[in-house]
Amino acid sequence: MRTTFILAAGLAAALSACMQKVELLPAEDVAAPAETAAIDPCPDDGPRFPITGLCVGRSVAYLDPGSDWQPPEGCTWAMNEAWIGDGTEALLYRAAVCNGVTTTLQVSGGAQSASVEYVKSALGGDALEGQEMIRLFVSDPANPQWHMKDILADQNENGEVECEIRPAGTDGWPKDALVIAPTPEERAAMPQDQPVAACGDWGLDEDATQYWEVRQGYEWFFHLGQDVTDFDPISITHIVKDADGNWTVAE
């Protein structure tokens, strides 16, 4: 995709600086909250997360309560975390627990984007290790859909159909989910009795759970496939730690 990752000169430095936060460091370089946990036990006497130090039982309060996700049949769910960069940013999410295995995700940094991928799947075990489920792009506050618009421009210049960015409007997806999809006129000319995939790898796939969100400082591209997910994609929340060590939901 020719233009997707070409940064405008004025934005390049800012995005490059922002992306430093998704370059992973060795685990030993992240300050462990074990001493804090020992001094300040959780009110429910439950455990703390090893990365953020948050009380596991209370971490659900950070999540958007609007999700109706249910774990796969026969499974339960638990809160989990994934760290970003130097340990001052993290993701919280609801993870399925199946036969004693908890879905665990990690964030792997790259030059222009970051990948949220499996460490372990409650349904697929170690076999899905490294499989990407979400791609993160740093959002430009002055132009929040910057990457999506760049992808769209490339698609409309080189693709076979005219596409647009529009609300997904799909039950079970986030209310603010977006898709890069054919215009209504283009879709009307396509088969109506079967799902279609259009607008490139980042575009609409009517036979899969694939959509964009713009929130909490990122453009999120979810490509979750056709199967039941063993984590709650709507629950994934970007949190940041301030100078006093307090965690808050990123704006």
Image: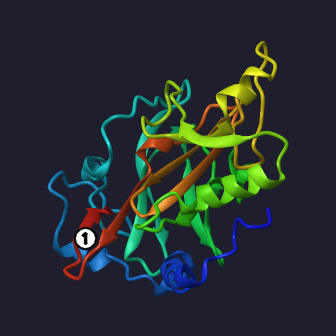
Quadrant placement of the C terminus: bottom left
Q: Position of residue 114 (x, y in %)?
A: 60, 67
**Residue 24: percent from the left, percent from the top?**
56, 78
Above or below for 23 versus 67: below
Classify 205 as above or below 106. above
The residue labelled by disc 1 is: 37
Q: Position of residue 72 (x, y in %)?
A: 55, 29
Is residue 89 left or right of 1 when viewed as pictured? Answer: left
Q: In the rendered image, which quarter is residue 67 located in?
A: top left
For the point 43% across and 40% down, the residue is 176
Location of residue 37 by image quarter: bottom left
Residue 66 visible in the snapshot: yes
Crowd around label 1: few <14 · some 14–19 · many ≥20 (10 Å): some
Q: Quadrant of the N terminus?
A: bottom right
The percent position of residue 21, horizontal first and vertical second, equals 48, 78
Q: Nearer the viewer, residue 88 or 192?
A: 192
Residue 223 location, quadrant:
top right
| Above or below, comparing residue 173 to residue 144 in the picture | above
Q: Is residue 130 above or below residue 185?
A: below
The residue positioned 46% from the left and 53% from the top of the image is 214
Res 123 seen here? no
Residue drawn at x 85%, y 42% is: 160
Q: Is residue 157 left or right of residue 79?
A: right
**Image-based side of 240 in relation to 153, left or right:** left
Front residue of 218/65: it is 218
Q: Residue at 24% of width from left, 51% of height from top? A: 58
Callout 1 secondary element: helix
Q: Amino acid at mark 1?
A: Ala
